[in-house]
Image (tube, rainbow, N blue to C red):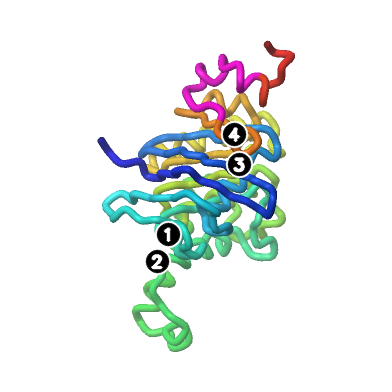
């Protein structure tokens, strides 16, 4: 049996007397889109923060099995090392560099894949200049695939909202991840933008060969695109399954979809 790319076991996160996560386990396998849903305060973003090194879990283990690489335990690793190991994320609130161009924002994502140090950047030897050209070329290629190449020299702050969301995902993919964590990517989008996002996520999986773990409140996109859905409530996992299984689960209906739907 193939090991999952992400393997979370008995994850617990306490903040003083508050238990934000309690014994949560989940996994993401190659080629999957897994949605993480639940009411506000259920612990979804806390889980993301544990996976990406922002929080050190109180208990439990987080393992990754990168394609072609050794199994690694993420607990205690710094955020930048986790990014370099192949996990990228976006945030619920867009965190672009607004005064930088679209191209520059994506180039920043390439930083963890460059080799030149401070001295090389100052001296600008042949290898450093070649690497700089490669960063620009690779970043432009990503923008082309995301239909953002026409905005290459625009300031990020001047993009329409939906394009800013796509740019943030493009910057995350510039780190060359095997797993992409999306925190409410459809937040604030209109129906047309949400439809385009759905197609983009599927393309990321199918063409870029990047698996996705996604927090999302838009149940239409969750039910449409997810291979599996994991449901949290008050920091505990209450359900896991396909869209059909989750839709019919009484505990999920009560906790998330609303008792009136029963």
Question: Is residue 188 or residue 232 the one in the foreground?
Answer: 232
From the viewer's perspective, is the residue at label 1 or at label 3 nearer?
3
Q: Earlier in the sequence, mark 3 or mark 2?
A: 3
Classify 110 as above or below 121: above
Mark yes or no: residue 136 visible: no
Other residues around mark 3 within 10 Å, as few (<14) / some (14–19) / many (≥20) = many
Disc 4 from disc 1: Cα separation: 38 Å
> How far across and how far down the image is residue 59, in percent?
51, 51
Q: Quadrant of the N terminus?
A: top left
Q: Quadrant of residue 175?
A: bottom left
- Tell whether 176 sits left or right of 216: left
Q: Earlier in the sequence, mark 4 or mark 3?
A: 3
Q: Which of the two discs, 4 and 1, labels the residue nearer the N terminus?
A: 1
Disc 1 + disc 2, Cβ < 8 Å: yes
Q: Which mark is residue 232?
A: 4
| Contact, mark 4 vs mark 3 (Cβ under 8 Å) | yes
Magenta segment range?
A: 238-253
Q: Which residue is mark 1?
A: 138
**Residue at which label 2 appears:** 134
Q: Is residue 53 above or below residue 169?
A: below
Residue lying farthest to the front in this orientation: 17
Q: Secondary structure at mark 4?
A: strand
Residue placed under numbered mark 3 in the picture: 44
Dot 4 crowding, Cα within 10 Å, few <14, some 14–19, many 20+: many
Front residue of 140 and 37: 37
Residue 124 drawn above or below residue 43: below
Q: Nearer the viewer, residue 234 or 244?
A: 234
Residues under numbered marks 4 and 1 in contact, where contact means CB atoms less than 8 Å apart? no
Q: Is residue 248 magenta?
A: yes
Secondary-structure class at tag 1 = helix
């Amino acid at each position: 049996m193939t090991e999952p790319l992400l393997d979370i076991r008995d994850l617990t996160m306490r903040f003083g007397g508050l238990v934000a996560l309690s014994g949560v386990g989940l996994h993401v396998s190659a080629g999957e889109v897994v949605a993480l849903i639940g009411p506000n305060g259920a612990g979804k973003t806390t889980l993301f923060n544990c996976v990406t090194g922002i929080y050190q879990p109180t208990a439990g283990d987080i393992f990754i099995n990168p394609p072609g690489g050794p199994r690694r335990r993420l607990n205690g690793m710094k955020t930048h090392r986790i990014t370099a190991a192949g996990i990228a994320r976006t945030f619920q609130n867009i965190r672009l560099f607004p005064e930088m161009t679209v191209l520059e924002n994506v180039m920043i994502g390439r930083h963890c894949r460059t080799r030149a140090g401070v001295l090389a950047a100052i001296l600008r030897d042949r290898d450093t200049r070649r690497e700089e050209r490669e960063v620009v070329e690779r970043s432009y290629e990503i923008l082309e695939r995301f239909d953002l190449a026409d905005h290459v020299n625009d300031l990020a702050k001047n993009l329409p909202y939906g394009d800013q969301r796509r740019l943030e995902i493009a910057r995350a993919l510039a780190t060359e991840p095997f797993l992409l964590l999306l925190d409410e990517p459809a937040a604030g989008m209109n129906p047309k933008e949400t439809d385009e996002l759905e197609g983009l996520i599927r393309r990321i999986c199918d063409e870029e060969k990047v698996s996705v773990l996604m927090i999302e409140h838009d149940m239409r996109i969750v039910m449409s695109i997810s291979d599996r859905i994991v449901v949290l409530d008050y920091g505990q996992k209450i359900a896991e399954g396909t869209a059909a299984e989750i839709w019919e689960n009484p505990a999920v209906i009560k906790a998330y979809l609303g008792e009136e739907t029963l």
